[in-house]
Structure formats: C-alpha cells, structure tokens
Image: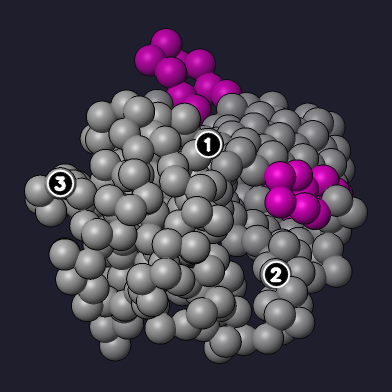
Amino acid sequence: MKVRKIFVCAIFALIYTAGVFAQSGKLTIAEALDKASRQFSGNLKDGTIVAILGISSGTDALDEYMLDEFTADIVSLRKLKVVTRANLDVIKKEMNFQLSGEVSDETMQRLGAKTGAETVIAGTFKNYGTGYRLNIQAFNVTTAAIQDIYRSDIQEDDILSVLLKKKSVRAVKKEVEEKKQYKSLIELGFMQTNAFALELRYCGVFPFGLLLKGGLAGISNGNGSILGVDIGAGYAFVNNNWCILGISAGVEGLSGAIYYSDGYEEVYNDLGFGTDLFIKFILGKHFGIYSDLGLLFGCESPLSFKVGFIYQF
C-alpha cells in the first residue's frame, strides 16, 4: 500500500511539474509574433487591407527581424491583405516617417490612408528591467479607433540575444550545439522482468554521448510488495533533437514477494547486473516516449523490458 501511494504521489508531482513549466507565461520573440499574427488574423475582418508599420525596439536589427517575421506570419495565414513593403517604404520616405514608441494616431492615419490600408498595425518592444514586453496594436485608419491589442512578456533566447547584440553569433552557435547534446529527462513508465512494476527514473544525457540514469520501481497489492531499482550509465551513439539511441549497463531489476488470500505466495528475485538497448523519441518541445530492451545476468528472468513517457526539462 505504501509503495502504491508513493507512485501515485510521484505521478501527481510529474503532472504538477509539467504544468508549472507550461504556465510560465513567457514566450520567445518568434512564438509571440506568431501568436500575435494569429490573433489579428482571427479578430480582424477577412480581407482587411493592413499596413504593418513595424515594431519599435530601439535596435535596428531587432526591428527588422520583428517586421519581417510578423509580416511573413500574417501573409502565411491568408486572412488579411498586406500592403507591400516596397510601397510602404516609399510612402514612409515621402512623409519622413520614423517609427518610435510615440507615433501619433494622426500620423498613422495619414500614412495608412496614403497606402490605401483600412487598418495600420504598429508595436513596441521594451525592456522593463526584469524582462521584455511586446505590445502590438491595430488602428482603424478612418476612425483611429483601436481594433485589437496583443501583449506578451518575452523570454530572452539565443535569437533575441544576438539581435540585441548581447552575444556573438559564434557564441550562440556553440551554445546551441552544446544544448543539443545535453538533455535532462524525467521518465515514467513500466518495468517488466519476471514481474510487472511502475517505474519513475531520471536520465541525463551529456556531451560526447554520456548517459546517467537512476530510478525506482515498485508495485503492491496490499499484501506484499515488489521493489526495484534502475541505476547505471551508458552511451548514446545517436543524440539529436528528436531521437536518442544507445546502450547502458548497471544494477536493475525487481525483488520482493506478493501474498494472496488463498495463501499462495509469489517470490521474485530479478535484481542484478543488466545491460539495455534503449531508444527515446522526443515528440515536441517537452514530451516523448521511451523503450528499453535488456538482458539480466544471474536473475530468474533473463530479459527486461521498459516502456513509458518522457518529460524533458
């Protein structure tokens, strides 16, 4: 009973951890621009002609990146008609227009009218000391009324660091390569030897393919229990963004006894040295699945099998 309670708690802890990460609230700049484009495309009337003036950050490279990405995202959704960049640039030059966080509604109305747009979209990207905030607004050219607003807190990623000139491109490339090699995984699944048990373990994958793992397994019917461990090290000869494939060795297996009301007793002794061939698939940013097939030495059952779900930090 105690073992069962422990594993129920472990499941809820894993779900809670995943929820905390999912609800952190901050998006990367690329994610925020994509979300903003979907919001405006959904809220503005289909076929509306829009002039995207830009998003002001005070950094030319970041301004250019945000304008290009946001425009491309809007166009790809095929809901709104976007004034061409070349036409907009000519009119901006004629009006001596400089985008900043303090552009008047009247100026945006005049610029929008010259382009034939029904709606103008402009925004700001600001550093608030503890983080960044993206703010994009859509204005009606005729009435200057605000038609829609998108706001999001932004987390600093490699792209943003380069655009803000906090990191060199070479340094970012090096970090990206290192991140591809390092993975921190929580795995919840089942272990099968001569018995069947629930398993919770941690796997860390490090540069040069080094893998370390450690976990506990167990099951109980209230009249006895089976406990197990899965501790060892290994080598991942495939380690990329979506797949980890390799071999490991260590102490693993199950040991214990289960008693039944009719007096029947099942004793298990499958705890010893084992080797595994493992494969893990990362499906999306955080979640995945895994499977291990192994050999146990000096145990009642010569084979072990594990399968389950992955949460990647």
Of 167 and 190, nearer the camera is 167
Question: Which residue position is annotated with label 2?
Answer: 176
Residue denoted by label 1: 76
- Return the x and y of residue 162 as percentages of the image width and height: 60, 79
Q: Which mark's residue is nearer the viewer, 2 or 3?
A: 3
2 or 3: tag closer to the N-terminus: 3
Labels 3, 1: front one:
3
Local SS, label 3: loop
Judge whether 297 appears above or below 160 on screen. above
Give residue 142's mark.
3
Residue lying at the far top of the rendered structure: 262
The quarter holding residue 20 reads bottom left
Question: x%, y% of residue 258?
Answer: 49, 28
Q: Amino acid at mark 3?
A: Thr
178 within the magenta span: no
Residue at x 51%, y 16% (from the top left corner): 264
Res. 132 in view? no
Q: Main secondary structure of the magenta part?
A: strand
Q: Is mark 3 in CB contact (under 8 Å) with mark 1?
A: no
Front residue of 253/198: it is 198
